[in-house]
Amino acid sequence: MLDDSPHQKIETVLGKLERAFANNDIDAAVNLFQEDCYWRDLVTFTWNIKTLEGHDQIRAMLTNQLAHIRPSSLRQDLNEVATEDDGIVQGWIEFETDVARGYGHIRLKNGHIWSLLTTMTELKGHEESRGFLRPLGAQHGSEPNRKSWKEKLETEAAELGYSIQPYCVIVGGGQGGIALGARLRQLGVPTIIIEKNERPGDSWRNRYKSLCLHDPVWYDHLPYIPFPDNWPVFAPKDKIGDWLEMYTKVMELNYWSSTVCKSAKYDEAEAEWTVIVERAGREVILRPKQLVLATGMSGKANWPSFKGMDVFKGEQQHSSQHPGPEAYAGKKVVVVGSNNSAHDICAALWEAGADVTMLQRSSTHIVKSDSLMDIGLGDLYSERAVASGMTTRKADLIFASLPYRIMHEFQIPIYNKIREKDADFYARLEKAGFMLDFGDDDSGLFMKYLRRGSGYYIDVGACDLVADGKIKLISGANIRELNENGIILEDGRELEADLIVYATGYGSMNGWAADLISKDVADKVGKCWGLGSGTTKDPGPWEGEQRNMWKPTQQEALWFHGGNLHQSRHYSQYLSLQLKARMEGIETPVFGLQDVHHLS
Amino acid sequence: MLDDSPHQKIETVLGKLERAFANNDIDAAVNLFQEDCYWRDLVTFTWNIKTLEGHDQIRAMLTNQLAHIRPSSLRQDLNEVATEDDGIVQGWIEFETDVARGYGHIRLKNGHIWSLLTTMTELKGHEESRGFLRPLGAQHGSEPNRKSWKEKLETEAAELGYSIQPYCVIVGGGQGGIALGARLRQLGVPTIIIEKNERPGDSWRNRYKSLCLHDPVWYDHLPYIPFPDNWPVFAPKDKIGDWLEMYTKVMELNYWSSTVCKSAKYDEAEAEWTVIVERAGREVILRPKQLVLATGMSGKANWPSFKGMDVFKGEQQHSSQHPGPEAYAGKKVVVVGSNNSAHDICAALWEAGADVTMLQRSSTHIVKSDSLMDIGLGDLYSERAVASGMTTRKADLIFASLPYRIMHEFQIPIYNKIREKDADFYARLEKAGFMLDFGDDDSGLFMKYLRRGSGYYIDVGACDLVADGKIKLISGANIRELNENGIILEDGRELEADLIVYATGYGSMNGWAADLISKDVADKVGKCWGLGSGTTKDPGPWEGEQRNMWKPTQQEALWFHGGNLHQSRHYSQYLSLQLKARMEGIETPVFGLQDVHHLS
């Protein structure tokens, strides 16, 4: 009897793929993929984060890499069940390379591979001390003058960065730096995290009072210690701050708070960075082999430039500096911008009794939080998903398995559904004059995030204030100049203001490289973030992956890490393994290092 | 076809039991149990922690309680599989009472109930905010002058204990008070935890330097936030201290550190305690309805009394005060006692270069840590158990399902196996003169712990030092008196000492009640801990449960909480539900309040 179960279909393809790899028969391997196909590799085959699209790219990759990588032991994960829906067979796979163990996901169409995800789980011989390999803690036996756990940590803290150099320095101790630091600690990579604030979590605590996470708890877990099941869906900023502080302590990170990174310079000959920091008023020179910028994926604050900004008598703030509404009750405030921060700040100011005007200069994508949670994320990241057995790891991998090239095709129907469901809501906003969009191709919030990291608001209440006129809206207008009393629009209207908040977003992360290292290095690595989709604020050519994030850049030993909590969690795994491999002297032949097409 | 699966056998019995309950047919219910039977109830039927042994006790309980409790909806948990081994059918059950939801475990022999465990999971209408019921965090919508999460917590911290009285005060902020405090917080019971130390976790940090947990990580989880899978098997004391501190913060407990409880007095007419505490140098009077002593299940330090203690020129410490070995390199130290603390302290002193003598006055039970982990705990609490799908909750319930009356019968074979495996080790110890025992009935460590909370050492290395003579051993000797220079034994031998450490254990927890409340109340509630087994330090009559722990006592509104991390985790669930029910005015008819047979 012919077994045509999904399991057997995958077995057949995997068997052929394994033989093709073993025989170094690249044509045979390539021909197992259908013509329209995607192979996304996270560090196992390419030592890069790379999506190969179509036969030619796969052939080129295998031609370069196969002899180095030596994949073997391709097999299905027998703890998971292969499925078939609408002609697409899906399953989970395990495999090895010469130096690593990997895990992945496969989709077949008509017996050929349509999508393949290959991710690195661990380096052989460098497995993390977890589960069966967890440390003993108590040191059994006896040993004269042994040090306690606490003494060892204290010694390490006293020596690292002074008499002993870290292998890695991470600049920026927010969620990104902390998640990566935890991974590196687990892998035994000596690392120092540099953070200008006083305490871990302050990058959240220092923001405006009403801020809560816009992503839900299931999407936000850090590595190793998930949030408990009493954790709020949308955690208030101070609560996340406290969690990050506790996490940093419990994960035993070398976290240099109240420390400012002043400069960094790479010595190509020594293959070493010189990083100058000021810690507690004293200059310390660090000489790590690797430097990670985790200074916020949004990069540096964008300050607009208007005539008269020096003349205006009131206060001006970038949204990242806004302290919250307390001081502005009864005051006139204009918030320039109409994305997340603008809405949050406007709502909090209105609640505190300020006279608030939002100045919308271009259209904004709005999605109600409930609808986004339910329709947009519910299958992977929700209590419903948890109840049905979905784990964070699996959700992350399913998400990672969707090729960026066609991701918008999966997103468009979701937002069509949301538009239909919330039609009345959108109609009310438009009636109030609000300029709406759903992305250049109607693919909604997540694509906007991946492409440009901006252009949307997840509504948790401010939209009603706009629709009801409680937050005054001026839309489609631009600022001509400022005078003593406020803003003059291009159409001549004047807006009086005691405070102007510029919720005007952030630049590319390589702006930090310009500040810390040099303009040359910033230009050499080029723009960070974005896919090259050719949509607004994400110019082409097509890159296929997010520019410069979590992967080798054109500057040797310089890395960018960041993103939302989901990305910090998931991609820190791949970045930490890349760093560990280099520390251990494991061969890491990078395939397809990205070219630079844009400077910022 | 007759279905004689384990599932069906349990279905049959549950169906009959449900009908008997519904018909108030107590005889029918009792007759479903075999003659030799045990029903352990944790708060659902008895509003007590109670094991009913045999038909008569079950009949008496049902006669008193059935009309109040109104059990219903008995059913098997369909997520678990019923099993049958050696003629014993086992399964998991769910049920309801008038006011609560319950979960339990059942064992059948020959179609009759041999053991039944019934535990309370939650009170109807007072479910915890977890999972699907977790809080939203962000407050959607808008509301003038709303307070942030942080402001609400700050307000609560400023008011509770001053302008607003807590419902419950817990004296003692160690692991027990913290675990219970977390449960009460989740249940919305306003609670203040009083702790004399500066920081949560200090009760661990302040102990001797080399201390690590003697129980393994799988056994030690706190409620809500399990240790991550990189956590050491035996956590060093400072690491546990840090975890407790972070836990207290993250679980948002009202934790009054650096606060001393000076006295407590119950007003029967007002049904209210007056608790006087000193917080930051200021006296504060608290008026809670319920008072929990979580001051350490070991109670107050036992200081021995010898002639000449006032004459001795050196230093004398109870083990609980011993600061660690640093100051004693090259000094002569005598440690009086031979249990866990004595061994740990001796080993650390030897490692630091002290001249150490252990004075063993009576026999001690020794078990190697590895053997205990593997043979004693491995099926329920180990990485192997986790890998096979055992959860902490399930392990706790299986453990709780074994009746205390016959628990030693399950334990004896375990220790026989250990004695055989480690025969050489025990022979070496005996050759060195060490007096060994395995408990009065050879049932080993856990029974000693439940009966008397003392009398053993879990070996992590000190035994080799004793066997090798590195720690000098004097065994079977008693102290006659002290002189200026040291100890004089009853046989006339003199032991010179610079330091004498009394590792002489602790008294009963009601000693704390005597100090804080009154001798009358301490005597009224009587001895805490122990089962009434009639073995050494656990005098009869048989009690069937641990005296006074986690359940109503003879003093209205006074409760004792404590034990190891496993017990703090598991029994805090039942104590918190008892307190919550009282706060909500739910009827809590207690069956079988224990009589007092011993004062201490």
Image (cartoon, coloured by chain):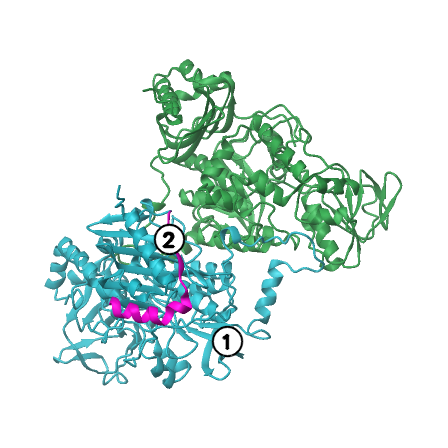
Chain colours: A cyan, B green
Q: Residue furthest top?
A: B27
Label 2 packing within 10 angstroms: few (<14), some (14-19), many (20+) = some
Residue annotated with mark 1: A288
- Residue B67, located in which quarter of the rendered image? top left
Q: What residue type is labelled 1?
A: Pro
Label 1 packing within 10 angstroms: few (<14), some (14-19), many (20+) = many
Q: Is mark 2 on a helix, strand or loop?
A: strand
Q: Pick the residue in front: A316 or B324.
A: B324
Q: Residue furthest right?
A: B492
Q: Do labels 2 and 1 share a chain?
A: yes
**Main SS of residues in magenta:** helix
- On the image, the x and y values in percent for residue B215 come to 58, 45
Judge from the rendering whether residue A294 lies leftward or rightward of residue B464; answer left or right.
left
Q: Which residue is drawn at 15% across and 71% down?
A: A475
Judge from the rendering whether residue A237 lies leftward or rightward of residue A476; answer left or right.
right
- On the image, the x and y values in percent for residue B19 come to 34, 19
- Residue A242, located in which quarter of the rendered image? bottom left
